[in-house]
Image (spheres, rainbow, N blue to C red):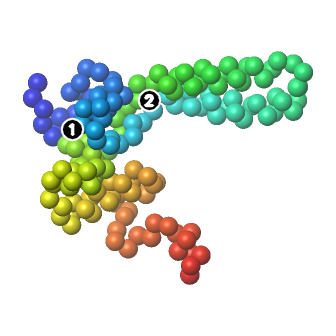
Amino acid sequence: MTMAPSSRLDQISTVSSKVLFREIQTHAALRLPRLKYAARGVAGCFMVLLSIAALPALALVNSRNFCFLFPLGTMLIGGILMHFDQNKFPSECATLGDLARKCAGLNFGRLVTFGAKPRDADLWAALLEVLTEHSLIKKTAITTETILLQTQFRAAS
């Protein structure tokens, strides 16, 4: 099978996205974008959150009975579901080219250290990748005029 930047990630590997990303990180020592939970992981997360919400209520209502074991068991099952979830690729990383662009942005400094030639456009692309990885702001909404730390900006004004 030939791989090209347009090759879909879900079609180029026989292993799960979680295993593929772990292998890339091990062999290339690159920082990769975060994987998204698949249905099993989302269900596990929901179970953990429900269990956390139920524990204080059960402790107040009935402290002598062992009702609190049910939410603890549910929390344990939810954690197991999250741990064994195979994850899925981020929506912005559908192809091998998307993953390469995202990785280049997230590892800009390391790549420059290894000899990559930094250009202003590449630096801006790297900054966008890092900002979108750590915030809820969409890449298209970030410009040179975007204020990132708005609460500090308002406090200083």
Relative horizontal placement of residue 51, taking residue 98 as reference (left or right): right
Q: Can residue 17 be seen in this view?
A: no
In the depicted structure, whether residue 72 falls above or below residue 154: above
**Identity of the amino acid at label 1?**
Leu
Relative horizontal placement of residue 56, taking residue 141 as reference (left or right): right
Mark carried by residue 44: none
Quarter of the image containing the C terminus? bottom right
Q: Name the residue under label 1.
A: 96
Q: Which residue is drawn at 43% across and 52% down?
A: 134
Of the two numbered discs 2 and 1 on the same chain, state the one appearing first in sequence: 2
| Front position in the image: 81 or 29 | 29
Could you tell me which secondary element the residue under label 1 belongs to? helix
Q: Residue at x 38, y 74 (%)?
A: 145
Q: Residue furthest front?
A: 113
Quarter of the image containing the N terminus? top left
Mark 2–mark 1 contact, CB under 8 Å? Answer: no
x and y percentages locating residue 72 in the rendered image: 70, 23
* C-alpha separation, residue under disc 2 versus residue under disc 1: 20 Å
x and y percentages locating residue 33 in the rendered image: 35, 42
x and y percentages locating residue 114 in the rendered image: 18, 50
Q: Quadrant of residue 69?
A: top right
**Identity of the amino acid at label 2?**
Ala
Mark carried by residue 38: 2
Q: Residue at x 43, y 57 (%)?
A: 137
